[in-house]
Image (spheres, helix red, strand yellow):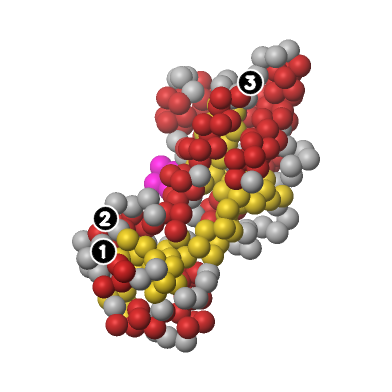
Amino acid sequence: MSIVRYEIITKVVELGSFTETAEKLNMTQSAVSHAVASLESEMGVSLLIRDRKKGIKLTEIGQKVLPHIREVLKRVETINQEIGLATNLETGIIRIGTFASASSCLLPKLLAKFQKKHPKIEFKFYEGTYEEITEWLSSGIIDIGFVVKGRTNPNFDLVPLIKDNMVVAYHPNHRFHFKEIVDMEDLMEESFIMPTGMYQSHVEELFEEAQIKPSILFEVHDCTTIANMVQEGLGVTIGPKLFLKTQQNIKISKLNIKNSREVALACQSIESASPAVKEFLHVAQSVFD
């Protein structure tokens, strides 16, 4: 069976479109369709459901087969990387799943050091939620994922990076500006912007421990939108220091109750990972040690 056809069908599933796949792979649409059809013919089963309204979906057998196809492609990638190392011709691609604050605050520093040593290794990034990153790792869509310890698959191998504390954020002219530590009870008097995204559970845990209820004025999912609202003086919020310290026209303070998330890099198995992935994890340990 042709490895190229494996690459084509995984790309069709990823993009959900024969047309976009053809453009991405610099092929004609008919060539993409023929490659998928010939693979299905050789296997004797239909892997995809083609529906004009609902788009492209995997059949039941397709859902079972696709993870194995991705595993084959990973093994081929590993073979190529091993050959590259042996011949001093590095090659390969690392697929990384990441969430917003990791993308802006952790990834650049890590990539800068890695690419100085290995400039020929390519990267592909997928940004999503904790749950999406865990699913992408489980299904083999990505090789490595930024995760929060305790909120991902316990069977993954983890490389701890940093402990990211929850802090309170407010406008520079707010009454908290002179306080290094803000008491949770002081937040009862404030218009509170409640995050409904990835770190909402951390915020809720803080209020539960303090045994108080915030005066929620807004509930917002996007962390950048929350930061913009704080900048406009619309309220205060609680969130990860890693992200909030990078935002302009916002001040942050510690809280009298501690809550943090432990950010780590995860992969299915370090032992069976490709040489490039192993090296990336090694560099990450040295950067954040």
Give the number of the disc on residue 249. 2
Q: Quadrant of the N terminus?
A: top right
User: Which residue has dot 3 on it?
Assistant: 91
At mark 2, the secondary structure is loop
Residue type, numbered disc 3: Thr
Can see residue 279? yes
Q: Position of residue 221 (x, y in %)?
A: 37, 62
Q: Please name which of the two marks, 3 or 1, marks the residue nearer to the observer.
A: 1
Marks 3 & 1, CB-CB < 8 Å contact: no
Q: Which residues are magenta?
A: 52-56
How far is disc 3 from disc 1 in space, using C-alphas?
Answer: 48 Å
Work out whether 68 lies above or below 212: above
At mark 3, the secondary structure is loop
Residue type, numbered disc 2: Asn
Q: Residue at x 26, y 62 (%)?
A: 172
Whether the magenta-drawn stretch holds residue 204 is answered as: no
Give the number of the disc on residue 181. none
Q: Residue at x 45, y 26 (%)?
A: 24
At mark 1, the secondary structure is loop
Give the number of the disc on residue 171. 1
Q: Earlier in the sequence, mark 3 or mark 1?
A: 3
Marks 2 & 1, CB-CB < 8 Å contact: yes
Residue type, numbered disc 1: His
Q: Please name which of the two marks, 3 or 2, marks the residue nearer to the observer.
A: 2
Q: Earlier in the sequence, mark 2 or mark 1?
A: 1
